[in-house]
């Protein structure tokens, strides 16, 4: 097993930044360099003011503050970092393709491929290359073939080490990981590489939580773990629709089934729909590879998880429109929350984007308040859909920095993210500011129906009639 003194990570994003910060924190003898082609992002990672870090994660700024400049570095000098490191993590983004073959489903690997070519170009000593990005199965072999065929007689071992951290709890998920998965070749040098990487995680995790597998199992397990998690959300959301038509209450059903130890209680919160950078993308990948192997039924089975999620977002928007007397044209609707879940400033695939888009199509006027998401991000999310012009998006949707300002003269409030602060608001004052009847549509099941109705609100909560 090699003794490691320097590692680097390409991609200073939601995964690369926190993961490397925790490794640096737990392995003081290893120098960790995180590189990115985006100068602005690196500048923010290096900002003296730790509140300006590009990623908001509870506990992250403390770890960065304690280690930056000691054994943790953020830089745009990609080639230098690659050349010096014994282990190189690839943690660049792999968005769903928006063009060509596999459009809308397959992952776009162009950034990963660029990284591999760059590593091949600059490496002068043997390297362990670790794929950290969530990638379609068989990517490791693609990286391997690029590295082996452009080479300068350098030996590369490719490992798959998928990330299981969830945003908002990333630091804790890294420090207390249920498991770390390391996939690699069963050759002697592959085994050595797996052991070398395992030793890094063994600095803080018990050995039995570090699982070694072959590359395919590791890559596939990541997609399957996310598909199973997303499936639970879609399953409970499907039942939430049924609850709204009957006298069953989704909270009671969740609790009743969750206490069966075989089912378990986590991930059974009905919501306006799952978002985030991974669930949809990973399921689409699973669907795409299943189809490419001719496994139509398998592909259809998993695709249904996405169909149900789209239905849930649409159902929420439709319910708002129907309740507001079948027209929202010119009506002010306040959005509380834009992020895809609480405690993150990430908005990728957030349900709020799609609910907003549906309401804007009906000419609603939306005012958004989110404690962590910037105005530019919100407009960028809407513009990306290309449903209407950027000018139109800015005319119809406003972003405010004060929750009370959003409520002013609003016909309705929609809760899209479960930020804790929404529970602590003075809802009596909010009621006074709103037009009457004052509607609240709770897409996150945060508030009590009884209390809200007592205050005078017309209150709807997902999963309750
Ligand atoms: C991660 C995983 O890598 C992705 O596969 C998973 O599905 C979602 O989470 P994430 O860290 O969230 O991605 O992505 P992002 O925050 O966009 O960060 C990626 C970074 O890589 C960006 O800062 C980008 O500038 C950088 N990058 C991209 C490079 O440095 N070089 C490139 O060639 C491409
Ligand atoms: C997920 C996986 O949990 C993580 O292991 C993987 O590495 C990356 O993808 P993340 O996308 O950060 O992490 O968030 P997660 O907490 O899984 O939530 C995903 C979405 O599901 C959110 O929009 C969340 O609000 C929603 N959700 C989750 C529900 O609607 N109900 C639930 O019960 C749980």
Image: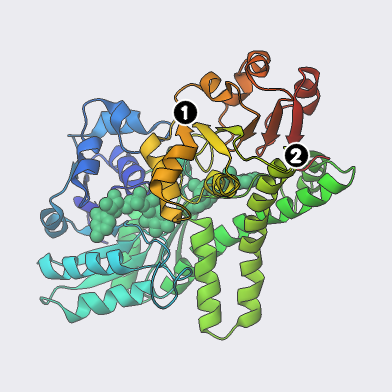
396 to the left or right of 252:
left
Residue 308, how many percent across, how many down? 67, 59
Residue 332, how many percent across, how many down? 59, 32
Dot 2 falls on a residue whose secondary structure is loop
Mark 2 or mark 1, which is nearer to you?
2
State the image quarter where residue 123 is shown.
bottom left
> Viewer-proximal residue, 376 or 393?
393
> Viewer-proximal residue, 347 or 264?
347
Relative to 177, is 125 above or below?
A: below
**Residue that mark 1 sits on:** 371
Ligand 1 position by quadrant: bottom left
**Residue that mark 2 sits on:** 325
State the image quarter where residue 174 is shown.
top left
What mark, if any, has residue 164 been given in the picture?
A: none
Q: CA distance from mark 2 to mark 1?
A: 30 Å
The residue drawn where x is 57% and y is 20% is 408
Count of number-bearing discs: 2
- Tell me, yes or no, if residue 22 can be seen here: yes
Residue 338, how many percent across, how many down? 51, 38
- Tell me, yes or no, if residue 187 can be seen here: no
Give the mark nearest the N terminus, 2 or 1. Answer: 2
Residue 113, how many percent across, how many down? 27, 69
Q: How crowded is the residue under tag 1: few (<14 C-alpha within 10 Å), some, or many (20+)?
A: many
Dot 1 falls on a residue whose secondary structure is loop
Relative to 348, is 426 above or below?
A: above
């Amino acid at each position: 097993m090699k003794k490691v003194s320097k590692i680097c990570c390409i991609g200073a994003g939601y995964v690369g930044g926190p993961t490397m910060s925790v490794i640096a924190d737990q392995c003081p003898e290893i120098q960790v360099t995180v590189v990115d082609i985006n100068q602005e992002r690196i500048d923010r990672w290096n900002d003296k003011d730790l509140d300006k870090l590009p990623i908001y994660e509870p506990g992250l700024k403390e770890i960065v503050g304690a280690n930056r400049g000691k054994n943790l570095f953020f830089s745009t000098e990609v080639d230098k970092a690659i050349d010096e490191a014994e282990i190189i993590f690839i943690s660049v983004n792999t968005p769903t393709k928006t063009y060509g073959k596999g459009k809308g489903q397959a992952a776009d690997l162009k950034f990963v491929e660029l990284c591999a070519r760059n590593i091949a170009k600059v490496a002068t000593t043997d390297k362990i290359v670790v794929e950290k990005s969530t990638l379609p199965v068989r990517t490791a072999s693609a990286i391997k073939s690029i590295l082996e065929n452009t080479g300068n007689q350098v030996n590369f071992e490719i490992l798959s080490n998928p990330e299981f951290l969830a945003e908002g709890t990333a630091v804790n998920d890294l420090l207390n990981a249920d498991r770390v998965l390391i996939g690699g070749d069963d050759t002697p040098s592959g085994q050595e590489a797996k052991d070398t990487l395992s030793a890094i995680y063994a600095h803080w995790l018990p050995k039995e939580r570090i699982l070694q597998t072959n590359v395919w199992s590791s890559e596939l397990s990541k997609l399957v773990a996310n598909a199973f998690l997303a499936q639970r959300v879609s399953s409970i959301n499907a039942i939430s629709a049924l609850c709204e038509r009957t006298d069953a209450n989704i909270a009671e059903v969740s609790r009743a089934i969750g206490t069966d130890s075989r089912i378990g209680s986590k991930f059974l919160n009905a919501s306006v729909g799952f978002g985030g950078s991974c669930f949809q993308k990973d399921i689409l990948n699973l669907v795409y590879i299943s189809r490419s192997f001719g496994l139509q039924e398998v592909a259809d089975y998993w695709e249904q998880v996405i169909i149900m999620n789209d239905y849930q977002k649409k159902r929420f928007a439709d319910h708002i429109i129907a309740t507001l007397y079948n027209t929202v044209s010119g009506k002010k609707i306040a959005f509380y929350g834009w992020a895809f879940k609480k405690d993150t400033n990430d908005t990728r695939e957030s349900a709020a984007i799609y609910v907003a888009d549906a309401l804007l199509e009906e000419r609603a006027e939306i005012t958004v308040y989110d404690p962590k998401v910037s105005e530019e991000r919100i407009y960028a999310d809407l513009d990306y859909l290309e449903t209407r012009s950027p000018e139109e998006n800015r005319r119809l949707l406003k972003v405010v920095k004060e929750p009370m300002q959003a409520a002013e003269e609003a016909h309705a409030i929609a809760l899209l993210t479960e930020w804790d602060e929404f529970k602590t608001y003075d809802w009596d004052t909010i009621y006074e500011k709103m037009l009457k009847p004052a509607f609240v549509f709770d897409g996150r099941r945060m508030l009590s129906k009884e209390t809200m109705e007592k205050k005078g609100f017309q209150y709807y909560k997902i999963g309750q009639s």
